[in-house]
Image (tube, rainbow, N blue to C red):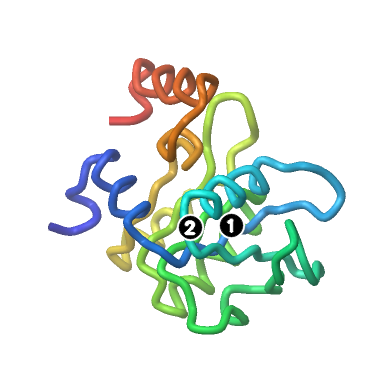
Amino acid sequence: MTAAEMTHQERVQDFLAQKRIAVSGLSRTKDSGAGAVYLKLRDHGYQVFPVHPSAETLHGDRCYPNLGAIPGGVDAVFIMNSPDITEIIVREALDLGVRHVWMHNNTLMGSSVSEKAVEACRAANVNVIEVGCPMMFVEPDFFHSCMRWFIRVTGRMK
């Protein structure tokens, strides 16, 4: 089955089956949504790698300026940046052979989705997720469970 033939739930399960996940969009100066996703994944046994162009450490872990700097590479990348930065990260991910990309997109925050990046992923048969957030699926709290329900009810997550 190709990535394009998968349901949203199957794409999410496939993404979360990966063990080495880069997380982009963490902030050095404040708590961020990407930081929360990073900590959630780390706390649930994933080997996660914070990506930030100028930070040396984040959340007590070594930080990497880009995907190519991560020793041994990654299986997946979660992106919580502006769409223009998403395009840069996706281009690098595709060049490195990363097969799983999740662009943050919910109802209450700005979206990280770039249609150009989504199309590039689809053309490369990469599992691309452009709706929701891992916080809605990895032992979700009440708020994220409600967000997942809302996005499903509104037809954005099929």
Q: Which residue is mark 2?
A: 117
The one nearer the camera, 152 or 14, is 14
Residue 103 sits above or below residue 33 on the image: below
Q: Residue at x 37, y 52 (%)?
A: 16
How far from the left and from the top, in percent, is residue 107?
Answer: 55, 25
Report the side of 86 relative to 59 (left or right): left
Which residue lies most toward the right here?
Answer: 29
Residue type for callout 2: Ala
Report crowding for label 1: few under 14, some 14 to 19, many 20 or more residues within 10 A (C-alpha). Answer: many
Residue 34 sits above or below residue 152 on the image: below
Report crowding for label 2: few under 14, some 14 to 19, many 20 or more residues within 10 A (C-alpha). Answer: many
Residue 86, label in figure = 1
Q: Earlier in the sequence, mark 2 or mark 1?
A: 1
Report the side of 155 relative to 134 (left or right): left
Residue type for callout 1: Thr
Label 1 sits on a secondary structure element that is helix
Q: Residue at x 41, y 71 (%)?
A: 98
Label 2 sits on a secondary structure element that is helix
